[in-house]
Amino acid sequence: MRACAAVVASGHYVLGPNVKAFESEFAAYCGVSDCVSVANGTEALELGLRSIGICQGKRVALVANAAMYGTTAVLACAAEPVFVDIDPSCHTLSPKALEAVLATGPIDALIVTHLYGRLADMRSILALADKHGFAVFEDCAQAHGARDASGRRAGSFGIAASFSFYPTKNLGALGDGGAVITNDPQVADTLRKLRQYGWTAKYRNELPGGRNSRLDELQAAFLRTMLPLLDGWNARRREIANRYSREIRNERIQVPSTSGEEYVAHLYVVQVSDRAGLQQHLAGAGVGSDVHYPIGDHRQPLFHDRFISTDLPVTEAACGNVLTLPCFPELTNDEATRVILACNDF
Ligand SMILES: *Cc1c(COP(=O)(O)O)cnc(C)c1O
């Protein structure tokens, strides 16, 4: 409320001091030189891809189990999505499957989605990028603050990375918001133009793909208030997730193994063959659940049979058996216990 009142009184509402301050605070938090805020996570993906040179005819590899966000951005750039299967244990991109795709033809870029808040296997992916010469772009919309054993944060591995600040994300605004981070000043400069109509000077529209895509001062002020709380919230999410992984004991429910800081528990996802049965059982116990995500990108109706010959067995199995249990910082220990008991007597 204080942040809101200060912005209202300031007279600055778009691209003002709070946006500037948030961008430098978030860049510092992620361990990169530049952050360019935009209107939402999907435009962060699209403008981010454009800023690294993705355009018509380029081939961009990505997974098909991340709710179409990356694919939507690739299509918006008029580029070609090339789908890669996932690892069966963590549901992020499988470097082995990527190698198989690379054997069939080169790609220009790879979108790595740190799905559910878990860092993908960046070491193997960066080695393949080195060998084959493609750009790595990270989608960090579910992974704000995740870091590897050396302390490197999500978004600092590739040439650029996108974030969403949709309210339910680990760092969420009170409305829509997004950002791209990078260590490349040229990429950042392009992004600052793309988000402001593609202007290279006032009223001079030069960059294709430019538009109005800005974070507003109110959202930036809210995000500045919450950024210092992010690590604590992530720790609480992880505490709940690790408790689930230790205490859910049911041979019909496959839980992820316990995790360190490489996982910020945006979503806690189990696998169960009788998914409808478990959902109904949980609902009866007053426990909500949801499916992230039920349809692979390559099977979305908008494509008709464009990807009919794309075979992604692990992705398709996951679409049929993943189930998300409640996991968010405000969940109490007693509520988490109820979730565990409900799973154990399924
Ligand atoms: C939420 C999300 C997005 C899109 O963000 P919006 O702000 O809703 O456009 C992109 N990628 C992933 C992985 C997401 O979870």
Image: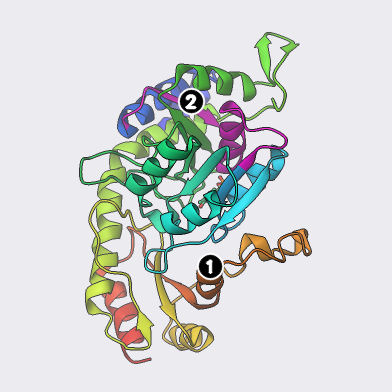
Whether residue 13 can be seen here: no
Q: Is the residue marked by circle 2 packed among few (<14), some (14-19), or many (20+) residues within 10 Å?
A: many
Whether residue 35 can be seen here: yes
Residue mark closest to the camera, 2 vs 1 = 1
Magenta span contains residue 66 = no
Residue 260 is situated, as x and y percent measured from the top left of the image, at 22, 56
Q: Image point 42% across, 51% down: which residue?
A: 114
Height in image: 18 above or below 304? above
Q: Image point 68% across, 66% down: which residue?
A: 299
Query: Disc 2 versus disc 1: distance between alpha carbons?
Result: 45 Å
Instruction: Give the residue at the far front of this rendering.
Output: 103
Q: Quadrant of residue 222?
A: top left
**Kind of residue sitting beneath label 1:** Thr
Q: Secondary structure at mark 2?
A: helix
Q: Is the residue marked by circle 1 packed among few (<14), some (14-19), or many (20+) residues within 10 Å?
A: many
Query: Which dot marks residue 315?
Result: 1
Residue range in magenta is 31-59
Q: In terms of sequence position, does the residue under pointer 2 or pointer 1 come before the other?
A: 2
Q: Secondary structure at mark 1?
A: helix
Question: Seen in the image, is 114 located left or right of residue 80?
Answer: left
Pick whichever, 283 or 211, lies toward us. Answer: 211
Pick whichever, 14 or 140, lies toward us. Answer: 140
Question: Seen in the image, is 286 located left or right of residue 345?
Answer: right
Q: Image point 73% across, 39% down: which residue?
A: 78
Which residue is tagged 2?
A: 7
Height in image: 243 above or below 17? below
Residue 94 is situated, as x and y percent measured from the top left of the image, at 43, 58
Pick whichever, 76 or 331, lies toward us. Answer: 76
Residue 284 is situated, as x and y percent measured from the top left of the image, at 46, 88
**Kind of residue sitting beneath label 2:** Val
Residue 345 is situated, as x and y percent measured from the top left of the image, at 33, 92
Magenta span contains residue 52 = yes
